[in-house]
Amino acid sequence: MLAENAARHDAASGSSRSAARVTNSPQGKVQEFETRILDALHHRVGKNERAAKPHDWYNAAVLALRDDIIDKWFASTARTHEAAGKRVYYLSLEFLIGRLLRDALSNLGCNRVMEQALERHGLDLARLEELEPDAALGNGGLGRLAACFMESLASLDIPAFGYGIRYINGMFRQRIDEGWQVELPETWLAHGNPWEFERRESAYLIGFGGEVTSDQGAIRWAPAEQIEATAVDTPVVGWQGKRVNTLRLWTANALDPIQLAAFNAGDHAGALAGQVRADTLVRVLYPADSTAAGQELRLRQEFFFSSASIQDIVRRHVQYHGDIRTLPDKAAIQLNDTHPSVAVAELMRLLMDEHHLTFAESWDITRATIGYTNHTLLPEALESWPLPLFERMLPRHMQIIYAINANVLREARRAGLDDAAIAAISLIDEHGERRVRMANLAFVGAHSVNGVAALHTGLMKETVFADLHKLYPTRINNKTNGVTPRRWLHQSNPRLTGLVREAIGDGFIADAERLSDLAAMAGDAALGERVDEVKRANKVDLSNHLRELTGLRLDPDALFDVQIKRIHEYKRQLLNLIETVALYDQIRSHPERDWVPRVKIFGGKAAPTYHNAKLIIKLANDIARRINSDPSVGEVLKVVFVPNYNVSLAEKIIPAADLSEQISTAGMEASGTGNMKFAFNGALTIGTLDGANIEIMDRVGRDNIVIFGLTAEEVAATRAKGYNPREVIESSHELAQAVKCIADGVFSPDEPDRYRGLMDALMQSDWFMVAADFDAYAAAQRDVDARWQNRAGWRKSAIMNIANVGWFSSDRTISEYAREIWGVK
Ligand SMILES: *Cc1c(COP(=O)(O)O)cnc(C)c1O
């Protein structure tokens, strides 16, 4: 089937190398791949079969496949030029793309062919795939969303560029030492990267600091420092190779990599300082910004990639379309959160200072071109920069921001808004130290401002952007997030994909909403049993993998209960852990009961400077050590903390999950996308009415999801009327006991007070409402147990989840952006 597909696509591709093809038959295809792999191994990797290490074979396999991709890449670009259509530009400080080989093979339909070609040399494709480093150029959901969007844009045949930074190290690698998180540099480029192409010809100068002068009305910015941004391109292959788009990541070079005079005078470090400064810019994702130097670096990164991207977009437009004033017809720029907000000021600067348009013309063009996506309502995550820092680093942009601000505030005044509203709308925060508000800049500089789930969009209008919403009442809109079903179902769960394909055909891979054909069969006992067999097989695979990683043996017949995501107090891993402790108590007190065997799986990274999050990781590990070694619970309860959670691990864990933990404090998780991936793979959600959980419930049905806890409104009301967590804890016997155990050091006998502070904070303030939701959560977990014991009922619910979450495909999300924000077909 797949081989046939591959042959069909190749026939349609019009490849320039088609002369080299022996035949389009599956066997001919295998032969041709083998020839290409050997050719790459010999002539590009420089090894023969005898000397080649597995990594050399991996490289050869990628290079062989890459030739096909490049042909399709050229064809896609040529088609876009001919059509002279609009392009989408997605600016994001993060792209959590993960591994690319399986993605590309699968989307090109070459999996079987590659597998067989490698088998002829005794090689296992799955093993080679494991050699690819996981490109972790992002933190979590926001970065993974950008990666899913890139795949969907290509699959929907929309011409698009992703723009970001080519971090040398990216996100840190997490090691767990004695239960503590240790951060290590991720050296994903150590063996080179066969997917990328450096484009020396696409380089731009990025200025910092200096002075602005005016000469007879002409403004001139003379930066004190300039760094060169160079493009590094990675092809993004859409489903069935329909289109190949470009992920363009910027790397930094000094204009003077070495100052020879200084070097020869013996000042070696000084002579190389320029290049070190450039490298520092692209070294890591999110340098700690607790220091002034850290803050400055972060702002430099944001301007560096925004400026390079905007210069590239403007250059391309002028080259192909001539008149800069038609930019909004040919380019849609989407800002993924506020990290690229400075692009608003940079586009204004290019239009006014280099293309000599008036402020008014430039402002119209800028707003017609840019859209902004908000991802969080947390006040501490809304970026703002100290005004003196901003002004020193970007003096011309500061002037432009003042001019924009004057314009917007005049409009607000005319609209009759009061002083308080005007202070809230201002791009400058005047409370205490003056700061530049990046979210307000993005809001006013965009024609569209979207939230990422219905609840979140509603709250945006009521909270952070309430006054801006009054001034621009049609600007805020909702685009509920999605995930690509290719990576998160088709590639990561081949067993389930095979089963679904047998049941309803394979149209669901390109059009996930076709999964709804399964709904009519949800009660079919035979199908239910086969879904169960698939899940069990995935759990066996995961158990084997976790045994290698952690040494722990897991029972694949237990309920696999999974919470994998960034560690953050609002995501409430602590609620899950305290409930685990309470359950442990219950199992020991009532050993005679018929407990459902559970494996609690945790994974996630904590920000290096986030003290409580790191302590929560240690607590998970302390609880795991204690419970896993207690013979009185035996196989009934196991706890695992999986180190170094990333995309590749998610791909292994999610297909094996029975229960998906989505338990954030209501109103705090903008959308979540992990919740969607689990549901696609037939896990039931236990969750609060937060983010996209609400929309998942609406689609899978109230009977097929386990909802508990306070609503967003109730959380706000509880806080407003004065919440006393101590009272709540003291009135709940199970909760009080669990908190006391943790506080008294039952899980940390080596340091009895380790969790005293964490538990005291829970008693005193509990901002995240762990105590308020505890009893409801514990009851919901017992409801999960009861559902699990009704096997037929559980299987039916699992199928209803798979059948009804097709809407959460990022294809649907991207279609909405295309139609309602970007104005592309
Ligand atoms: C999907 C995904 C996330 C986002 O998970 P949430 O549960 O929505 O926070 C984070 N990290 C990785 C590696 C992912 O694949």
Image (spheres, rainbow, N blue to C red):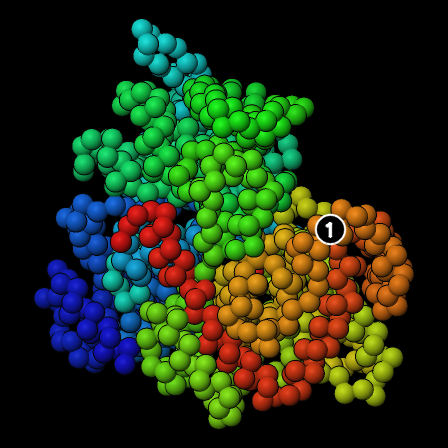
Is residue 70 in sight in this rendering?
no
State whether residue 679 is above or below residue 389: below
Return the residue found at the far top. 216
Is residue 734 rendered to the left or right of residue 302? right
Q: Is residue 113 above or below residue 130?
A: below
Percent x, y for residue 401? 46, 24
Residue type highlighted by circle 1: Ala
Structural crowding at the residue carrying mark 1, measured as other residues with C-alpha within 10 Å and reported as few (<14), some (14–19) or many (≥20)? few
Residue 541 rendering spot, x and y as whole percentages: 53, 78
Q: Confirm whether residue 784 shows in the render.
A: yes
Q: Which residue is mark 1?
A: 717
Q: Residue at x 64, y 66 (%)?
A: 687
Quarter of the image for residue 126 reads bottom left
| Left or right: where 556 falls relative to 157 | right
- The quadrant of the rendering that contains the C terminus is bottom left
Image-quadrant location for residue 236: bottom left
Q: Residue furthest bottom?
A: 526
Residue 505 at x, y percent in the picture: 33, 81
Q: Position of residue 387 (x, y in %)?
A: 56, 23
In the image, is residue 482 above or below residue 699? Answer: above
Q: Secondary structure at mark 1?
A: helix
* Residue 360 vertical placement versus 663 (above, below): above
Q: Which residue is at the far front?
A: 416
Ligand 1 lies in quarter: bottom right
The residue drawn where x is 47% and y is 57% is 481
Quarter occupied by the N terminus? bottom left
Q: Nearer the viewer, residue 209 or 239?
A: 239
User: Count the marks: how many?
Assistant: 1
